[in-house]
Image (tube, coloured by chain):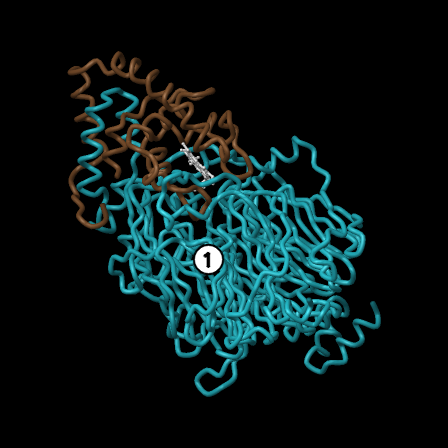
Chain colours: A brown, B cyan
Amino acid sequence: MRTVVRAKTTAATLVAALLASLGTINPALAQDESLSELMAEGRPLYQDNCAACHGDRGQGTGTAPALDGNVNLESRPLIINQVLWGSSEHGMPPFADVMTDREIAAVTSFVRNAWENEFGIVFPRSVELRR
Amino acid sequence: MTKRRNRWCASASALAMCVVAGSALANEDVLRLQEEEGVVVMPSITYNGWNYSPLDQINTDNVDDLVMKWTVQLGITDEFEAPPLIVNDTMYIITPEPNHVYALDLTDNGKILWEYRPPFSDEELSAALEVACCGSQTRGLNYAEGKLFMQTLGGKVIALDAETGEELWLTEAADQIYGETMVGNGIVIGDLYIAGNAGGEYGARGAVTAFDINTGDIQWKYYNMGPNNEVGITDRFQPFYADDQIENPALASWKGDSWKRGGGTSWGYFTYDPDLNMFYYSTGNCGPWNPDYRREWGQVDLDDAGGLETYRNNYCASQLARDATTGELIWAYNITPQDQWDLDEPLITPLVDLEMNGETRKVALKAARNGYFYVWDRETGEIVNDPWPFQYVDFMTGVDKETGRALYDIGKMMFTNEEDRRQYTQAGVLSEEEIALQEEEAALYGTEEEAEQVARGGTDVSWCPGIAARNWENDAYSPQTGLLYTATQTECRTMRVTEGEFTVPQTAEGYRLREYVGEPYNVDVNGNPTEHKSELQANDPVSGETVWRIEWMESNRTPILATAGNLVFQGGEDAGTFRAIDATNGDILWEFRTGTGFGVTPVTYISPEGEQHVAIIGSNRGADEKVEANAEPDAANRYKRQGSTLYVFGLQRDMASAN
């Protein structure tokens, strides 16, 4: 992640590749099922690991910003990186060592879809890819 | 009042200014008290910001005999960052939000004489919490003339009667609509209590405000960026470098009206030189993090050496010196122009007189958050050392002594769009891994929204120090060793800046315009991968060398106290231990496990029995950091559980004699 870089691929090419792949699966259906599963697993994880700082309804506290209605969560990479690696400078601990991929996928899926949020699922593979 | 002024004006060096300014100058009570051994009336003990105590009963020979004397539970379970004050056999402690204040009786093992709780409505409190970026900490309390001065997170500035805890005045001073909060830093100079503001992550515009210590009336407020009259730029503004000798330097260096929410808040500590009647502070990160919103979009003008020529965004991430009576800006130096790496600089500016190149110079020191060590002539703002990196720095290659410019590596600068970046550098846009990851995810999720998320990506930059070679935690300077002690860290990070909403007033949501990518990594001072996360460094401002360093395997960045006992005291949040360290060579001489984290400078004083005591508050952020029940005894977070306790230590033999 730090050194080797390739000049060619741009976000635009990625989008094109992605759109081309849209016909091949039915992601919406697959996601619905696993989303409710992951959210059920994520709810208690949120209460145990996040609520003390972010509030039991994601409303934020003096320690940490609100997650309910937080448009930053639209970015899946943002929330996964934030939970994995934290930002200790600003007071959020990393969870990479204390939660499994599935647990982080569950808690981030929960946060992205709880309360007023509707940002969609996070698959465990996305967490694994960022370790 | 009159008497005080007269006495101060009798001093020859200050005479000229007494004639000109007539009032204010140093507060005589503070000047007198700061000379008294073991009295602490401001966060860094003395106006010069040394955090150095002349007490030496406890020293390298006997520190091993320290034992705990008494302890008090402080009730608010959040990280304490405000050093206790000591005056009149009383210790004063302010808690993090909700900002309670305790007066503890030192003649009676910390009996609570009074407690003050500021008046908050629930709405006020939650409004403040919503815009507080990084926790609800407060960093100081000041004492002068029988009064205590404090700030609440939500921006109430309050004076209390130090004897009774009675509220003397309260002034509302922060505008939360504009993301402004207050974190408790202040300094009393003359009849003024001068305070900063916070909120640079959410659109606040940095400022300093002076309150009349007797009435709370605001005497002046000056911003760190904007039009001259709002910044306090008059004909007395005489910056050293050409970049600042332009018309409207704090306005013309911003794109459009971006200065209105340019960050650069003043959330760190102030120091003061009574002879020059100037106070010193440095400012927070530029806002928003994405620099494209503060310059011509996608455009960077570097000179041949890498110095930034345009859109320098004066004066966020900068060093400032102001007249302490009128607030006028005297000089300013932009440490990290157009900061885009969250390189806030609001940390202490210790003032010392040093022999440099054969002459005595009155200088201001800064082990800066950007990783470079600066020494300025504190009268003129001229850089008098060769700024050098005390931790590994790769976004900068040095400082041009002619222009004063920080020299940048274009490959480490942030661009929202790849096309823009490509005009300047072929250096990385996205790493191989990141590209593979995005491709795999695109297939994995396979929705149109996902496509948009990928497109939002921006370009990635990995840099050191990410995001701080050190932070606000106070240094200590020992005149015995001539060394500046600083808690540093080795972390580097990868970040991308993103497009988004940018309006005023802003909300916490949708403002940051950046996100982290991947795992932080640690490097030593030479840039080689390392396992250790933090260091305690002893740096020589004259020779420009790190004389010794302790490497901590777990994160440990807490404020430092130096004493004439040739000791350095520091809380060790890496292992939940409070430590005494030999100031000359860095040997750890004594440790006491409290089992907590630490965020506050240790404090030392003379007990009513005439014995030196040293005290520290062990505390941690509001919530337990996740520790598995079966974690290893030395696991990173093992000692970061909730709680907040004051511990007071003294030499064992006192205990024997007291019995």
Left-right relation of B567 to B1: left
* Viewer-proximal residue among A110 and B438: A110
The image shows residue B601, relative to residue B101, as above or below, that is: below
The image shows residue B415, relative to residue B575, as above or below, that is: above
Mark 1 surroundings: few (<14), some (14-19) or many (≥20) residues within 10 A: many
Quadrant hosting residue A28: top left
**What residue occupies the far right of the structure in this picture?**
B2
Left-right relation of A83 to B481: left
Name the spot of residue B202 as percent of width and height, x first.
51, 40
* Viewer-proximal residue among B570 and B125: B570
Name the spot of residue B108 as percent of width and height, x first.
73, 58
Q: Mark 1 points at which residue?
A: B572
The local secondary structure at tag 1 comes to strand
Amino acid, disc 1: Gly
Residue B176 visible in this rendered orientation of the protein: yes
Q: Which residue is drawn at 60% across and 71% down?
A: B53
Q: Which residue is drawn at 70% across and 74% down?
A: B17
Residue B364 visible in this rendered orientation of the protein: no
Name the spot of residue A62 as percent of width and height, x first.
55, 38
**What residue occupies the far bottom of the structure in this picture?**
B358
Left-right relation of B190 to B287: right
Quadrant location, the N terminus of chain B: bottom right
Instruction: Identify the chain of the residue marked 1, using the numbered disc in the image.
Output: B
* Viewer-proximal residue among B425 and B47: B47
